[in-house]
Amino acid sequence: MGERWGVLIQINFPPGQERPEAALIGRSNVSILIDKNRKKFETITEEDIKRAILPLSPQSFDPARFGHEGFRANLSTGRIDCLPSGVHLWCNITPEVLGFLDWIFVTGYGLSYSGGSSSSV
């Protein structure tokens, strides 16, 4: 996915959690960084992003911190942090999550899709 979109992908190992099996690494707890210095969304609003994430059935939204726009979408299966600098996925990456990522990469971050299938993680 990183090559396809030209982004930096970081795999996270949260403290207190056991390391996943090798086959599961990269399927959750992933950060996708677009521009670490960006503090505001340039082409869309937070409300646009909240509407786009609604198919994932968020239970609640919490505001971002540290002077950034953005929010945390709390899901029944984890959390997605949507920030101007990138997206942090603290949930399993499902086809529905991939659909949201495709949307936010193009609409929110202005990235160009370079081909391939978004159904593989």
Image (cartoon, rainbow, N blue to C red):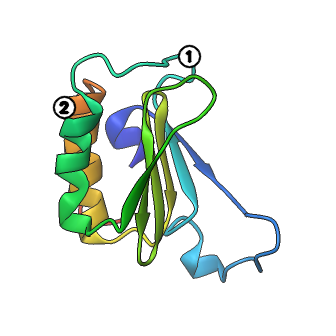
Q: 121 above or below 65?
A: below
Q: Nearer the viewer, residue 93 or 38?
A: 38
How many marks are shown on the rendered structure? Answer: 2
Q: Position of residue 100 (x, y in %)?
A: 24, 53
Residue displayed at 40% across by 31% down: 6
Q: Which mark is residue 25?
A: none
Residue type at mark 2 is: Thr
Quadrant in the rendering for residue 121: bottom left
Q: Residues within 10 Å of mark 1 (few under 14, many from 20)?
A: few
Q: Position of residue 102 (x, y in %)?
A: 23, 47
Residue type at mark 1 is: Asn
Q: 120 above or below 108?
A: below
Residue displayed at 26% across by 69% down: 57
11 left or right of 120 in image: right
Asked if residue 58 can be seen in this view, the reply is yes
User: Element type at marker 2?
Assistant: helix
Q: Which residue is mark 1?
A: 37
Residue displayed at 19% across by 31% down: 107
Q: CA distance from mark 2 to mark 1?
A: 19 Å
Q: Which residue is mark 2?
A: 107
Q: 6 above or below 26?
A: above
